[in-house]
Amino acid sequence: MEKRFVYADNAATTRISKAALDAAMPYLTEQFGNASAVYSLGRKSREAILKARQQAAKALGAEVYEIYFTSGGTEADNWAINACAQLGEAKNKKHIITSSIEHYAVLESCKALERQGFEFTYLPVSDDGFVSVSDLEAAIREDTCLVSIMAANNEIGTIQPIADIGKLCRKKSVLFHTDAVQAMGNIAIDVNEMNIDLLSVSGHKIHAPKGVGCLYCSKSIDLPSFIKGGHQERGKRAGTENTAFIAAFGEAMEQASKGISERAAFVKGLRDRLIKGLDGIEKMDINGSLDNRLPGNVNLSFYGIEGEGLIIVLDMQGICVSSGAACASGSLEPSHVLLALGKSETQAQGSVRITLNEENTEEDVDCISQKLKEAVEHLRSVSPLWDNG
């Protein structure tokens, strides 16, 4: 098979779409005005930001003034968790519930709050990565101020029962935040139907540029400011707006909310073709459930080899995959997500994550299958860990 370039790490980042790029370009060139300026050049930037806010709100089933633009998902997660902690502390409620498989943007925010005297419950997950709603209900206390559970996991693709979690939190009068960075564009999201109080989105996962995202915050919450300074973002997040990227983000949000079922069916077909193409590889595990996960996610563990070595060999063949979360790339620690599923350190360190999207093709998938088989066979042939038994 002829060598070809195959990008299959779409959970890490996506290619910017033409629509998003076209939306951004005027504000990188002729329409460069500061959105806070009163003259027409500034007003045009302000109008672009309003349009993007409307697009993002519509995509989430939210109101326009419930959308706050951020630099991405990490900032949105930090803002949501710290804001709810601040509101909870004012009511003498300093208990927060999250899961053991959250993104580091959530987990590190939680660790910082623990050092400030907050108490945390880290819910376990099943061996295929699901949070139990009954476990959550048992964990909620009188002093619980926030539940933060991601909509879909960035490593294994597990889609959590967000609507059920939101319903429980509303019943218990506890704020509910969800990191929807991986879910946006893959599952339909309606913040009202799902009883979501706060939600994080990152642009570069949905074909917008890196460095832009949003936080949805329900109008029922008096959201504390996150960055002090000027009046931007209704006084909640100071700093001159990145008009070009915000315009691109709005367009990407609009596109991501359209045709979800059709897109998911196509990508799932590619994923299933990939898995079928890997038949015959010994001691290979698929991590997480295939029944309720993101359509393009395939997380695999191979006994007897290191995941990082496999990634390097595939890269030499023009194939881009990862060993898990991009933010943890280079870490010698095994995936906290796979360990939470009950995997051993050896299994976790021998894993790779392949994430496909609508830009991939059957030819891409067949190339990955063949080159992955060859890479596993080669690495095992030189591995002291592989005994073929």
Image (cartoon, grey):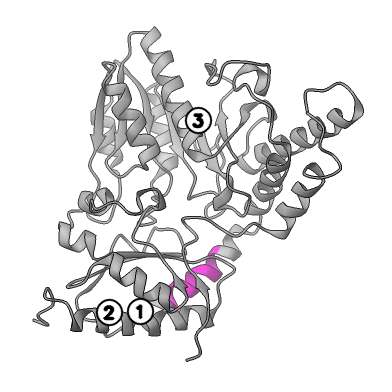
Q: Residue 332 at x, y = what percent?
A: 24, 53
CA distance separating discs 1 and 2: 6 Å
The magenta segment: 264-273
Please tell me how crowded label 3 is: few (under 14), some (14-19), or many (20+) other residues with Cα within 10 Å. Answer: many
Q: Residue 3 at x, y = what percent?
A: 50, 85
With 264 as the anchor, is 99 left or right in this view?
A: left
State the quadrant of the C terminus.
bottom left
Task: Let me know if residue 269 is in the magenta part.
Answer: yes
* Whether residue 195 is visible: no
Q: Are marks 1 and 2 in contact (CB under 8 Å)?
A: yes
Identify whether 136 is placed above or below 235: below
Q: Which mark is residue 372?
A: 1
Q: Amino acid at mark 3?
A: Leu
Q: Amino acid at mark 2?
A: Val
Q: Which residue is mark 2?
A: 376
Identify whether 179 is placed above or below 46: below
Q: Which mark is residue 198?
A: 3
Q: Amino acid at mark 1?
A: Leu
Task: Let me know if residue 142 is in the magenta part.
Answer: no
The residue shown at (54%, 63%) is 264
Q: Residue 317 at x, y = what percent?
A: 43, 79
